[in-house]
Amino acid sequence: MPVPDVRCLTSPAKSTSYKSLCKASNCLKCTFCSHLGHLELNCFLKNQIFASASPLSQPPSEVSHSASSASPAALSFVLKVESHLSWNADTGATAHMTFNHHWMRNLKPHRVPIRIANGLVVYSEGVGSVRFNPIVNGQEMPPLEFTDVLYVPALCSNLFYVLFLTLHHHFTVSIKGNTLDIIGSGIFQAKTGVSSSAFLLGETIPVKESASLSSTML
């Protein structure tokens, strides 16, 4: 079986320490950031992200425009938030993948190898589905559900497998300026942000908030 190749960087120390530390019976693991040593209730990254949600919710073009005058620390934080909360519309990925455990619905154990950009191989821990509310031209669209999403704690970004929709669900993709339109049985838009990568516009629905919502399966 070929090893999927994704373009997300992580450090060797992260994968190694994760594997060794989790052998302890009392290991604490945050379900928000997937790091060890604390629970979601005390997650520093989660608190930072939600405390800064309002200024960072402006359109990517506006964030990019103001980024030139931002400090390196502020720019680094924007990039971290962008990669943590957003889906990278990646034509090079071979599956939908996320490291956000609290997004995963119907999670089942599933272990497959994934080769990352620095040549290391990490492993998925499960597979399930994720619900997403797309925003197109400023309007909120009906929720959609991504299926066969791999849960990969060692990743550093959420990868949306664009070619899966074009190859298996007859979607079409068009690019104009910094906007990527993905059109089929559902509609997505993606725009380039501070990092120049294209991120889906919309919001991922955590499991606790999605129980009463109906969605289209993709």
Image (spheres, grey):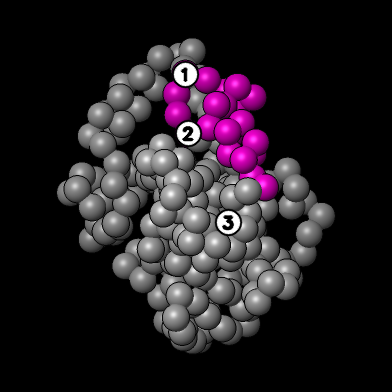
Q: Give yes or no for contact between labels 2 and 1 (Cβ–Cβ under 8 Å).
A: no
Q: Is residue 56 found left or right of 125 in the rendered image? A: right
Q: Where is mark 2, residue-wise?
A: 34
Mark 2 residue type: Ser
Placement of 59 over or under 74, stated as above or below: below
Q: Which mark is residue 129?
A: 3
Locate the N terminus by quadrant: bottom left
Task: Give residue 82's position: percent from left, percent from top.
Answer: 49, 51
Observer-nearest of 200 and 102: 200
Residue 23, picture quadrant? top left
Q: Where is mark 1, residue-wise?
A: 37
Q: Is residue 23 visible?
A: yes
Q: Residue at x 30, y 24 (%)?
A: 17
The tag earlier along the polypeptide, 3 or 1, is: 1
Element class at badge 3: strand
The tag earlier along the polypeptide, 3 or 2, is: 2
Q: Residue at x 44, y 50 (%)?
A: 69
